[in-house]
Amino acid sequence: MGKKLFTAAAAFVTAALALGGCSSSSSDTGGSADDGPVTLSYAIWDAKQEATLRKIADEFTKANPNIKVDIQVTPTTNDGYQTKLRTAATAGNAPDVFWLNGPNFQFFASNGQLLPLSDQNAADAAKWPSALKELYSYEGKQYGVPKDFDTVGLWFNKKMFDAAGVKYPDDTWTWQTFTDAAKKLSDPAKGTFGVAALLTGQENYYDTILQAGGSVISADGKKSGFDDPASIEGLKIWTDLIKNGASPSQAAMTDTHPVTMFMSEKIAMYWGGSWNAAEFNKNPAIKDIVDVAVLPQGKQRATVIHGLGNVVYAKTKYPKQATKFANFLGSETAAKIQAETGTVIPAYDGLTETWVKSMPQFNLKAYIDELAYAKPYPISKNAAVWNKMETDILTAAWAGTTPIDEAAKKLAADMNAALAKEK
Amino acid sequence: MIAPLVTGLAVFYLWPVFQTGYYSFTTWGPFGGSEFTGLANYVALFEDDELLRAVKNTLVYSAIVVAGIPLAIVVAALLNQRNLRGVGVYRALYFLPVVTMPAAIAMVWKWLYNGDHGLINHVLSFVGIPGQNWASDSRFALYAIAVIAVWMTVGYNMVIFLAGLQAIPKELYEAAEIDGASKIRQFRSITLPLLTPSIFFVAVLTVIASLQAFDVLYMILGPTNPATVESRTIVYLFYEKAFMENDKGAAAAMACVLLVFMMAITAVQFRLQKRWVHYV
């Protein structure tokens, strides 16, 4: 009896192992054959772009019937996208093609997680803006296909401006005009605010730091700029807005995301990236009452320019097909779809006008005008480490528990220690 | 007969335990690959003030959840009346949070706790209490989340207490009634003492579960929440180390510390049971 049971159990375990083996090998089929049907996984983090990318992927499958694309969306909430991606890559299981941004690119490239691009279409590659090409190259090799680029603009609610009797923002605005307007537009009794001091680099404090003449990181990428008095000025404009009641508190902005507040007319101004335009355009409640202008100027005019890249995983089972798809994402066809749908400004020379015209009721030209004084997004070899420090340390300053100059100095010290560890 | 179970346990529980023990002495590279660094992770861990705060938070959180056990006893006693109309519906309602995904629960409670348009602040405004950002103010967040945990565990504990209540012989109550004992006296002198084995079981499980509190905390807090730094539990810290900072070795060390900590508390509970648990 006992022996019989043992045999049965052993058989069960063997079966389980065999079945387990089966399921993992089935996904391998076609890996060796170049022309067999394959399905590539393509990881992105912005659900609002999924429909557009689906359209592009379908175009690609039309031209290459054997290659299908499975788009996987993981939101960036709580750092979810990066956490999942890095964990999958550690296990040797990252998606075949995926999005990366500037602060994370060099970390993946320098650790051999990305496949250098090959078989690029020279005509397409010539149209990629050189600053973005450089952003996604490492040690002389091109690893990423520039997907889009973005600058930051000042969105405003015309209805709320009219009600408060404030003139709409334009290119004459300075920090003074901006903060005065923010205070005037706030009405604590109604729970409305002039602006939201969202705790984020690209859309808020990176821009103001540059406008104040400061820097986030030195040009050689070895020293933090957060303790520069000018940089502290750029951070202080935001904490002051919270202190004056011209912006919701950090706790309130945690409970409800400022972009939601802007779309529900709780805040009159919002510093938004060019990728926000499509979202506002799709919202019938605010579509006709909001518009965008260039950012106000501090000591100088400035905004951060950044763009995403499509990269290929080094250990992909289908290097040939994945590279083909990545190159297609950098083609004129793909760029045109992104521009015409207004999704993002494609990283492809000559198509910015198409994007500007895609939503004629907005002054999208403001985003393009800013290119004249846009500065590159601050990165280093392992920027994610000090990006996390920014969030951890600045959250306390935004909440008002640490004075901003103290927080900035601590951040600079911690960041310098992290930069020293980068090899 | 137990071979499949033992194999499963060995492969999915015991082996990872030993593996984690080993990893706690290693330092990991960015995308895998590890080298042996001895006690370095433990030294760094005990030098970090964050761990102390996380231990304190975890204990406060667990204490609140354990304090919710009497609530489950009361609910079970109320729902133990066979002649109550719709008793099955009530039991199902109390059990519902147990079978609901923690992520969904967190989303709903996040809305209830919302400072601007949350239901709780709305209700409080009727009695003139000013609204608060319950889930994003470091004065309240940990307690607010512990309340969710109490709400989530009442149903599960209730089921165990119901079973315990139904195992108490009817004759004892009949005898007490003849002696003229009131309902409350009966509850105190018969129900509670004979329910102590169930209470002990529930207490041990609740402590272990709440020492591992993570999912709802993670969903409600998050990196830019001003309450996060002061409300992190041990497992929250572990997750940050293991997956956000990619420091798997340090995270493994933390997991080992938590394991020892949990074993110690459980051992104390078992030692103390002789004093108050009555087995029939």
Image (cartoon, coloured by chain):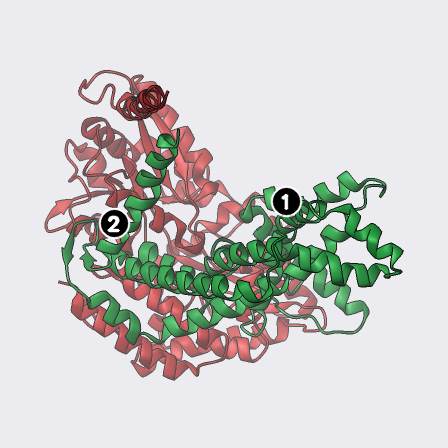
Relative to A220, is A203 on the left or the right?
right
- Which residue corresponds to the image point at 70% horizontal and 66% vertical from the top-left? A163
- Is mark 2 in CB contact (under 8 Å) with mark 1? no
In this rendering, is residue A368 above or below A344?
below
| Side of A228 where B272 appears, left or right | right
Depth check, mark 2 against mark 1: the one in front is: 2
The chain painted green is B
The quadrant of the picture occupied by the C terminus of chain A is bottom left
Pointers 2 and 1 within a single chain? no
Q: Which of B146 and A393 is in front in this view?
A: B146
For residue A153, the mark is: none
Foreground: A270 or A23?
Answer: A23
| Percent position of residue A24, x then y | 29, 26
SS state under label 1: loop
Q: Name the residue under label 1.
A: A284
Question: Chain coloured red: which letter?
Answer: A
Q: Which chain carries label 1?
A: A
- Please name the amino acid that badge 2 sits on: Gln
Numbered disc total: 2
Q: Distance between the residues labelled 2 and 1?
A: 55 Å
Image mark for residue B19: 2
Q: Is residue A109 left or right of residue A187?
A: left
Q: In this view, does A378 lie above or below A319?
A: below
Residue B196 or residue A143, whichever sits in front: B196
Picture coordinates of residue A281, whole percent (x, y): 55, 45
Q: In which quarter of the image is the N terminus of chain A?
A: top left
Question: Three-letter amino acid code at disc 1?
Answer: Pro
